Image (cartoon, rainbow, N blue to C red):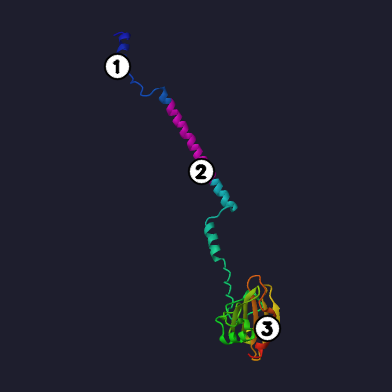
Amino acid sequence: MDERKLEELFREAVPSAPPASFDEGDVVRGSRRITARRRMAAAGGGVAAAAVLFAGVGFGTGLFTPGEQNTVASLRESDPKPPAQPAPPTNGPIVMSDPGTRSACGAPDAWLADALVGALPEAAGRAAVSASGPCPSGSRSAAFELAEGASTGNVSVIVSPASSVGAEQAEPTEVRRPDGTEQVVRKAVSGQVLVVRSDPDGATEAPFAERLVAIADGLAGRL
């Protein structure tokens, strides 16, 4: 057998190669996917490294501390609270010349109402009302709503135990308040403190202000 026939026999014995399952486009796309994966892996590693570095700097420099919020909350809860202010006393001496301490005087006293009508006939036929102003503890009072010309107001008599009025307030005085109220204080023969007062309505003058001294002096000798 010559060499040419041997070559043909060997060539026929070698199986033919199968056709390729991918083309040039598949190769390009695969290469791009591999490149993209490598870039994402590199970027993720950089972010993680930056986070670790920032955390280390924060803890090292005291920018933040584990459990810091819980610690602050605990400190706030442990802060001492200011003590509650005690309520102001409701009884005891009342500064009668201070309009800021006014309180209700209660129902009018019948005897004082009659005594005031006797000293001030203009009140006759009118119903007695409560005094408009401060009344010390244990006091009695009576008042009338009266008018003198254009002046209107509340003319009242208040009798209080000396123990419920400050010593300075028990001294005989005649005063005119900034709000226009006229007040006369006298010491009664019984030792009680007598106050005769005229409280004007609004901006009017206090009615019968010029007669308060005479009324107080007359009543002080009867109480």
Q: Which mark is residue 48?
A: 2
Label located before the other in sequence (2 or 1): 1
Reading the image, the residue beneath label 3 is 185
In x, y percent, where is residue 189? 66, 91
- Identify the residue at horizontal 68%, vertical 87% (top origin): 217
Which amino acid, by three-letter code, is at mark 1?
Ala
In x, y percent, where is residue 9? 29, 13
Check if mark 2's residue and mark 1's residue have beta carbons within 8 Å: no
Magenta span: helix, strand or loop, mainly? helix
Give the label, 2 or 1, closer to the camera.
2
Relative height, residue 91 to residue 70 (above, below): below
Q: CA distance from mark 2 to mark 1?
A: 59 Å
Q: Which mark is residue 13?
A: 1
Residue density around tag 1, few if under 14, some if 14–19, many if 20 or more, within 10 Å: few
- Identify the residue at horizontal 55%, vertical 46% (top origin): 53
Asked if one can make out residue 47 in the rendered structure from this viewpoint, the answer is yes
